[in-house]
Image: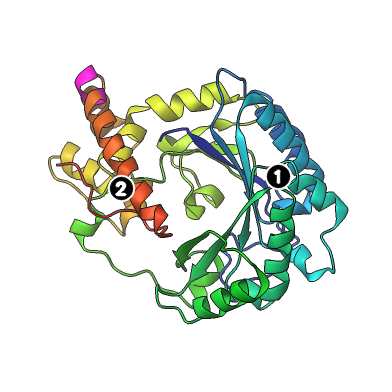
C-alpha cells in the first residue's frame, strides 16, 4: 500500500560490528538529525498520517530519548510505531532504564537476531530481553537473516526460544544479500529476465535516509548512495508528511515501478528496451528523469482507467502478501506480474 508506512533512520551509528551489516555501521558512522526528525513527525495529523512509522538505523536505541519522543508524537496522530534493534543492550544484566522508557512508548519491538548478531550478543540474553519487553505490554517479533531457507542456525534459534520462552515469538525470515559488509562473502545470484519482470515492492514506503533525504526506496544502495531523481521525494527539513505522501502516491514513474517494475517499464515504454542493464535495481537507477520514456509513462498513467487497473492489481498483491507473510517469508512474490 503506497505511503502506508515510512522508515525513519535515527542514526547510522551502531556499537555492534556484524559481518553481514547492510549499512556498514560503526560508532563513527554519524548521521541522523533528532530535531529535524521530530519536526517532520509533528507534521503527522489525525487526518493525514502514515499507518506505520518504522524507526531504524544503525542502532536507533543509541538515542532512546529521541525514539521515545518520536513514538509519543506519532501515536498521538494515530500512527503505530515499530522500532528494530540489534539488541546491544541485551549484554547487560537488565534493560537500561532510558531504553525501557523508549520501548514502552512503541507499539511493536523487533529484535534483529541471526548468527551474525549472536557472535556479539548471546542468544539466550536476547530471548530473555524479548520476554521482558513482551511483559511490558509491547508486541514483539524477531527479524532473522539466514544464509538459506534450510540454514541450520534456525534450529539453534528455535531451541533457545523453546527453552527461554513459554510462548512462540513471531519471526520474519530474510536471506543475506550482497550489500554492505556481506559483499565480502555473498554474491548476487544472476537473475533470468523473466524473474526480473516483476513489480517493485520497494517503491511503496518512503525512507528517511541518515542525512534527512526522503527517498521512495528502501534499497540500502539507494538510501546510502546517489539517489536517482525519480526516487527523490524531498528532505525532512523542508517537507512535511502530506507533501511526501502525495508525491509517493501520485508520481507517474513511481506508479509505473509499482505496476510494471523497472525492467517492465523499459520493455513497455521503449521501442528498443535496454532492459536488465546490470540487474533489477540497477535498471531502476538508470531510468531517465525526463525525455521520451518519462513522457510516455506520464501519458499512460494520466487517466482513470489506469488508476482502476492499479487498484485491482494492488488488491491482488496485498492478498498474496498476506498469505506469504503469514508463513514468515520476507521475499517478494514472483507470480504477480501484470501483462
Residue with the mark numbered 1: 32
Q: Residue at x 38, y 27 (%)?
A: 251
Q: For the residues labelled 1 and 2, say whether their Cβ atoms are less than 8 Å apart.
A: no
Residue at x 46%, y 23% (from the top left corner): 246
Q: Nearer the viewer, mark 1 or mark 2?
A: 2
Quadrant where the N terminus is found in the figure: top left
Instruction: Look at the image and say whether residue 126 sits in the magenta stretch.
Output: no
Whether residue 135 appears in this view of the structure is yes
Using residue 14 as the reference point, say whether residue 297 is left or right of it: left
Is 154 left or right of 339, judged from the image as shown? right
Residue assigned mark 2:
320
Residue at mark 1 to residue at mark 2: CA–CA distance: 35 Å
Residue 269 location in percent, x, y?
18, 37
Work out which quarter of the rendered image holds the C terminus and state it.
Answer: top left
Residue at image location 67% in from the left, 31% down from the top = 75
* Rendered view: 172 above or below 257: below
Amino acid at each position: 500500500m503506497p505511503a502506508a508506512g515510512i522508515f525513519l533512520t535515527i542514526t547510522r551509528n551502531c556499537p555492534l560490528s556484524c559481518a553481514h551489516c547492510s549499512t556498514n555501521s560503526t560508532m563513527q558512522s554519524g548521521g541522523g538529525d533528532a530535531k529535524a526528525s521530530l519536526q517532520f513527525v509533528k507534521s503527522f495529523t489525525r487526518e493525514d498520517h502514515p499507518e506505520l512509522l518504522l524507526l531504524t538505523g544503525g542502532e536507533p536505541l543509541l538515542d532512546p530519548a529521541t525514539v521515545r519522543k518520536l513514538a509519543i508524537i506519532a501515536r498521538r496522530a494515530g500512527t503505530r510505531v515499530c522500532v528494530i534493534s540489534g539488541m546491544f543492550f541485551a549484554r547487560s544484566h537488565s534493560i537500561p532504564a532510558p531504553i525501557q522508557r523508549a520501548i514502552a512508548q512503541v507499539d511493536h519491538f523487533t529484535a534483529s537476531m541471526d548468527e551474525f548478531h549472536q557472535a556479539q550478543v548471546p542468544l539466550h540474553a536476547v530471548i530473555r530481553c524479548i520476554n521482558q519487553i513482551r511483559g511490558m505490554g509491547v508486541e514483539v517479533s524477531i527479524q532473522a537473516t539466514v544464509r538459506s531457507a534450510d540454514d541450520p542456525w534456525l534450529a539453534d534459534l528455535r531451541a533457545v526460544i523453546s527453552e527461554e520462552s513459554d510462548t512462540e515469538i513471531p519471526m520474519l525470515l530474510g536471506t543475506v544479500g550482497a550489500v554492505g559488509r556481506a559483499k565480502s562473502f555473498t554474491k548476487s545470484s544472476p537473475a533470468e529476465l523473466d524473474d526480473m519482470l516483476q513489480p517493485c515492492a520497494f517503491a511503496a514506503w518512503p525512507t528517511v535516509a541518515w542525512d534527512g533525504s526522503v527517498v521512495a526506496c528502501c534499497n540500502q544502495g539507494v538510501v546510502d548512495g546517489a539517489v536517482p531523481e525519480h526516487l527523490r521525494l524531498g528532505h525532512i527539513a523542508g517537507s512535511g508528511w502530506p507533501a511526501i505522501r502525495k508525491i509517493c502516491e501520485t508520481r507517474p514513474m513511481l506508479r509505473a515501478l509499482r505496476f510494471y517494475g523497472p525492467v517492465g517499464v523499459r520493455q513497455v515504454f521503449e521501442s528498443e528496451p535496454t532492459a536488465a542493464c546490470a540487474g533489477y535495481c540497477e535498471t531502476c537507477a538508470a531510468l531517465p528523469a525526463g525525455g521520451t520514456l518519462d513522457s510516455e509513462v506520464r501519458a499512460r498513467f494520466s487517466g482513470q482507467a489506469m488508476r482502476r487497473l492499479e487498484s485491482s492489481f494492488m488488491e491482488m498483491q496485498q492478498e498474496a502478501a498476506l498469505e506469504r507473510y503469514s508463513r514468515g517469508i520476507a521475499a517478494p512474490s514472483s507470480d504477480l506480474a501484470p501483462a
